[in-house]
Image: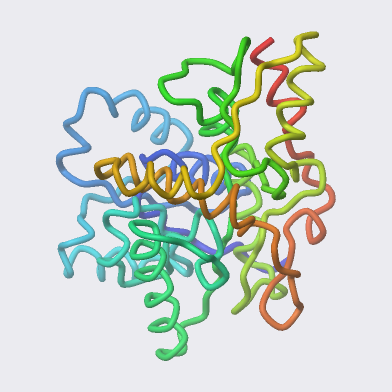
């Protein structure tokens, strides 16, 4: 059996990064995490860093903005996975943080348009330099959508009424964060994902907004009042809402109004689908995710 790649995760203490770190260790990779000095001394991150150490993660002190420390740690590994936030995307000099929409196939408006454009430019730079890559298009994080159905100010799924963005008929994809970590790591040493986009689009996680609401209504045995925010009204809301709240709305516009998760076919020339490549991964379905809120 070929030796497993040594993996560096940058942004490993972040929202999605910690799941990638855990998946890497579980899969038997020697795993490194670049950690800033401020993170090392952060009491909120202390438990997570302790867990990393217990798992055997190599914590390497460094910074995305410190070129020398970055180059030094990159030389220790075979693969770099970036999970930095969108605010740092333009500062990357390695495999890009691609956890979200396929930025080459979106119909986004501002401010999401500019965020996606930065990621697209990073792709072009990587390709021009001939750096081997895998872009991971995860679509929506279930942990963001399921707890509130993106309802303003909500702390749980709706029980009385629900605001539906668009006409509710565009298909979107909702993936659990742990599964995103698992699929990402499975792709690391897989030649089928080399210089391709790995789409995480498992069939049991593809739903329209209306279908998600109907599934939830069935679970709670109740019909919700439905309020539709059609495109013109949503565009007005985005225009009048300050940053960064308008960024979230603009991404929702891309997903739920334009259908940017599923309005194209995955062609073998540029992409592969994760659940098809790895049918043995027992991913969490949206149906199962909703059960946690009953």
Q: Nearer the viewer, residue 103 or 211?
A: 211
Q: Residue at x 31, y 72 (%)?
A: 93
Image: 48 above or below 199: above
Side (left or right) of 83 relative to 271: left
Q: Nearer the viewer, residue 224 or 115?
A: 224
Q: Residue at x 37, y 29 (%)?
A: 48
Q: Does residue 121 appear in this view? A: yes
Image: 98 above or below 23: below
Image: 211 above or below 222: below
Q: Quadrant of the C terminus?
A: top right
Q: Does residue 285 appear in this view? A: no
Q: How many marks?
A: 0
Please provide percent x and percent y for residue 219.
Answer: 79, 14
Q: Residue at x 78, y 25 (%)?
A: 215
View extreme (front): residue: 232
Please provide percent x and percent y for residue 203.
Answer: 81, 48
Q: Residue at x 70, y 49 (%)?
A: 170
Q: How is the image coloured?
A: rainbow
Please provide percent x and percent y for residue 226.
Answer: 65, 24
Q: Nearer the viewer, residue 266 or 194?
A: 266
Please provide percent x and percent y for residue 137.
Answer: 58, 59
- The image quadrant that residue 281 belongs to is top right
- The image quadrant that residue 23 belongs to is top right
- The image quadrant that residue 248 belongs to is top left
Q: Quadrant of the N terminus?
A: bottom right
Q: Nearer the viewer, residue 182 or 137?
A: 137
């Amino acid at each position: 059996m070929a030796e497993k790649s040594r993996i560096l995760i940058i942004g490993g203490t972040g929202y999605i990064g910690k799941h990638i770190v855990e998946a890497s260790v579980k899969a038997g990779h020697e795993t490194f995490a670049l950690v800033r000095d401020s993170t090392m001394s952060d009491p909120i991150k202390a438990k997570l860093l302790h867990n990393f150490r217990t798992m055997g993660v190599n914590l390497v002190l460094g910074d995305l903005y410190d070129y020398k420390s970055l180059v030094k740690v990159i030389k220790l590994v075979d693969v770099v996975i970036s999970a930095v936030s969108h605010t740092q995307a333009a500062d990357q000099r390695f495999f890009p943080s691609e956890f979200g929409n396929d930025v080459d196939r979106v119909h986004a408006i501002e401010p999401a348009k500019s965020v996606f454009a930065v990621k697209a430019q990073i792709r072009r730079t990587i390709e021009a330099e001939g750096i081997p890559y895998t872009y991971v298009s995860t679509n929506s994080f279930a942990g963001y959508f399921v707890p509130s159905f993106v309802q303003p100010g909500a702390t749980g799924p709706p029980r009385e009424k629900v605001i539906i963005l668009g006409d509710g008929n565009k298909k979107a994809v909702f993936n659990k964060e742990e599964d995103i970590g698992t699929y990402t790591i499975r792709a690391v040493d897989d030649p089928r994902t080399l210089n391709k986009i790995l789409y995480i689009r498992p069939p049991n996680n593809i739903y329209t907004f209306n279908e998600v609401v109907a599934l939830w209504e069935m679970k709670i045995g109740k019909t919700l009042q439905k309020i539709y925010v059609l495109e013109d009204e949503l565009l007005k809301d985005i225009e009048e809402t300050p940053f960064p709240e308008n960024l979230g709305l603009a991404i929702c516009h891309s997903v739920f109004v334009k259908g940017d998760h599923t309005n194209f076919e995955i062609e073998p020339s540029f992409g592969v689908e994760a659940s098809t490549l790895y049918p043995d991964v027992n991913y969490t379905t949206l149906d199962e995710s909703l059960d946690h809120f009953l």
